Amino acid sequence: MHVARLIAITWWFQLKQSTKAGIFVFTAIIEPLIFATLAYYLFKAGKQPGTLLYAALSAGLMGIWSATLFGAGGAINYQRWQGVLEPLIAAPPPYLLVLFPQTLAASTIGVYSLTSTLLWGRAVFGIPLHFVHPVAFLLAVAVTIVALGVLGLVLGSSFILYREANALSNMLEFPVWIVTGAICPAGCTTSPGGSRRRGGIGRSAPGRSAAIRGRESVGHSLSRRFTS
Amino acid sequence: MSGARVFFVGGVMSYRALFSWQSPTFYIPTMLAHPAFQILFFAYLGRFSHVRNDAFYVVGNAVQVSAMAGVFGVAMTIGGERWTQTLAPLLATPANRMALFLGRALPQIANGFVVSAFGFLVGRLLLNFDPPLSSLPRLALIVLVSTAACTGFGLVVGAFGLRLRDVFIFSNPAYFLMLLFCGVNVPLSALPHWMQIVGSGMPLTHGIAAAREVAAGASLSSVSTLVWKEALIGACYFLAAYLLLRLFEAEGRRRASLELV
């Protein structure tokens, strides 16, 4: 009971704190909207109208990834800068139970991304939101958030070995979008007529399978693109 | 003589003191790896969307990544004065403001050129991008002009560092909006008319267009109009930056807000 309370309160506190930070607002809302717009015009120019909803959805998923990467990757460093790392470690609860809700809050911030890009697509570009399986969609999103929150725990604790954790976060943003197939499906790294250059990393990344399920629940017409 | 010293020596000193991404542990992941992955990401996205070939995305993004130095670097060296609490003493000096601020742009132009060149190298090694060797000097000239124009834009963004507490509130969206408006990844013709107008007034747009033609084998004279437009736009941004810096300096003095962090 105490553990559940600790996780819930820390998660909620971190969520509120992050929502007020300019960098998180940019990462979770502004940046995904820019990418959603870019992807919309790119796919439109490629004459693939069926992928317009996919553009909005993918940009939202990219936002969830970015929020996790920047929020969780720098979690311990932020605590150090704020001068609360020592008290948190010295406190009776295991530090793991303090860090996990924080990384979970970071990935939860990504819900803003998904919501904003879907609403942006609907309001600005008139992209219809037809959820074939709305419950499955919500479930996929929830599973993605939790999976990325747990991955954030790994990121946060790994990055502590590297003083410039935010440099690593900066660097990893595009690679995780590539390997998880956030916007490009499995075959897009293959050069036209060339060899496939991608390994199997993306297949085990938590966001990837959940992202595919999320898209499949939005529309059957999209699901074919992601069955490899 | 004093102005020249402030311009050159002051510019280099501010770069060394305030550009916090210069250590290898920051420079390699942020200024080299991030642009490299950006180029790969958009090239793969381009393959998926079937809009253009790899060369389109390599050239567009390799020129645009110069904004890592041109926008973020410049913003950092101006906004950094506030964080280090040296803004007020700096503006209390009688130093020539033109030399003071423009000098901060010079190292970032060189830095942006290096980042951009690395981007082209990544495109050459990892993607289907193979420009004729004879086009490289022309390409280098266009990248230099584009980087300088982008640095002018970065100074405008950095000027807000005299007005706002966190200059990154402007520099982050500025960098990513360039990806959308400047024809980096989406052909300008595919954008709505109003976005094309905005894009044509932004730095890099004409430089990228010129670089694409040159990489495809065009001569410098055939793209000279685009290059001159890029240079002119850059000059306009430098002028706007100077005026904004003076305005925000006066505002900061009036409001006593130069030391707020």
Image (cartoon, helix red, strand yellow):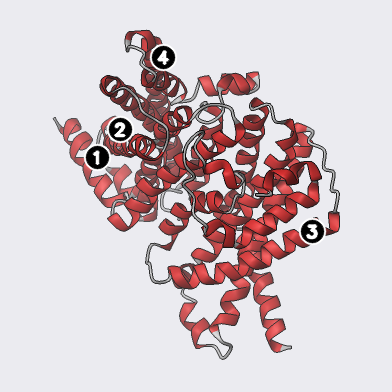
Tell me, yes or no, whether the two marked residues, 4 and 3, touch with CB atoms within 8 Å: no
Looking at the rendered structure, the secondary structure element under dot 4 is: helix
The answer for how far apart the CA atoms under marks 1 and 4 are is: 29 Å
Residue A160 is left or right of residue A122, and the answer is left
Q: Nearer the viewer, mark 1 or mark 3?
A: 3
Q: Position of residue B31 (x, y in %)?
A: 36, 46
The front one of A183 and A26 is A183
| Residue A157 seen in the figure | yes
Looking at the rendered image, the disc whose residue lies closer to the viewer, 2 or 4, is: 4
The picture places residue B109, in percent across and down from the top left corner, at: 30, 34
The reply to whether residue A79 is in sight is no
Between discs 1 and 4, the one toward the N terminus: 1
Please identify the residue farthest to the left as the structure is shown: B1
Kind of residue sitting beneath label 4: Leu
Q: Residues within 10 Å of mark 4 (few under 14, many from 20)?
A: many
Which residue is under mark 1?
Answer: B11
Q: Is residue B242 above or below residue B17?
A: above
Residue B102, disc? 2
Q: Secondary structure at mark 1?
A: helix
